[in-house]
Amino acid sequence: QLQLVESGGGLVQPGGSLRLSCEVSGFTLDDYGIGWFRQVPGKEREGVSCSSRSGKMINYGDSVKGRFTFSRDNAKNKVYLEMNNLKPEDTAVYYCAADTTTSPDFCSVVPPYRRFAYWGQGTQVTVSS
């Protein structure tokens, strides 16, 4: 059974940092690309970052470039999202998802997101003073 489980969310002050983790099971990071997304109630889901299956390509959404960093630990079957200089507008539920169809050296955070067939349950990030 393919599963993704996010952790690491919480409450942080503006300018602070958090590291989100996504542990996958039922497949390996060599099988599928992974994306990070976020969503605020009443708004469209937003692509935050992604890594290709091979790990050769990593992309970021414009709103997080220079502040967020995607990394992966193949041995642990985990990916991470390091979030620095957090802003109140980063408040959202963050999800990781597996891209089951894109070629091994490519990833994109541009919608549509149909290629992401498996999703975690999400972790809440709140940026507030």
Image (spheres, grey):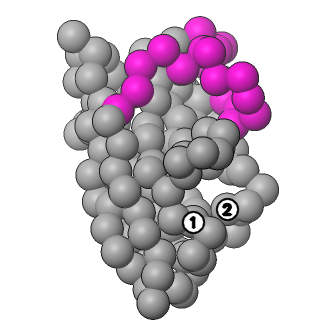
Provide the residue span drawn in magenta. Answer: 101-120
Image spot of residue 84 (x, y percent): 53, 75
Q: Tell me the residue at 73%/29% (across/down).
A: 111
- Per the image, the residue denoted by label 2 is 64
- Per the image, the residue denoted by label 1 is 90
Labels in figure, total? 2
Q: Secondary structure at mark 2?
A: loop
What amino acid is at disc 2?
Answer: Val
Q: Secondary structure at mark 1?
A: helix
Seen in the image, is 115 located left or right of residue 23?
A: right
Q: Tell me the residue at 21%/10% (across/down).
A: 1
Seen in the image, is 85 located left or right of residue 65?
A: left
- Can see residue 22? no
Above or below, 24 against 1 in this view is below
- Asked whether the beta carbons under mark 2 and mark 1 sit within 8 Å of each other, the answer is yes
Question: How many neighbours does mark 2 have within 10 angstroms: few (below 14), some (14-19), or many (20 or more)?
Answer: some
Above or below, 30 against 71 in this view is above
The residues bearing labels 2 and 1 have C-alpha atoms spaced at a distance of 9 Å
- Dot 2 or dot 1, earlier in sequence: 2
- Can see residue 5? yes
Direction front: furthest residue: 42
Question: How many neighbours does mark 1 have within 10 angstroms: few (below 14), some (14-19), or many (20 or more)?
Answer: many
Magenta residue check for 73: no
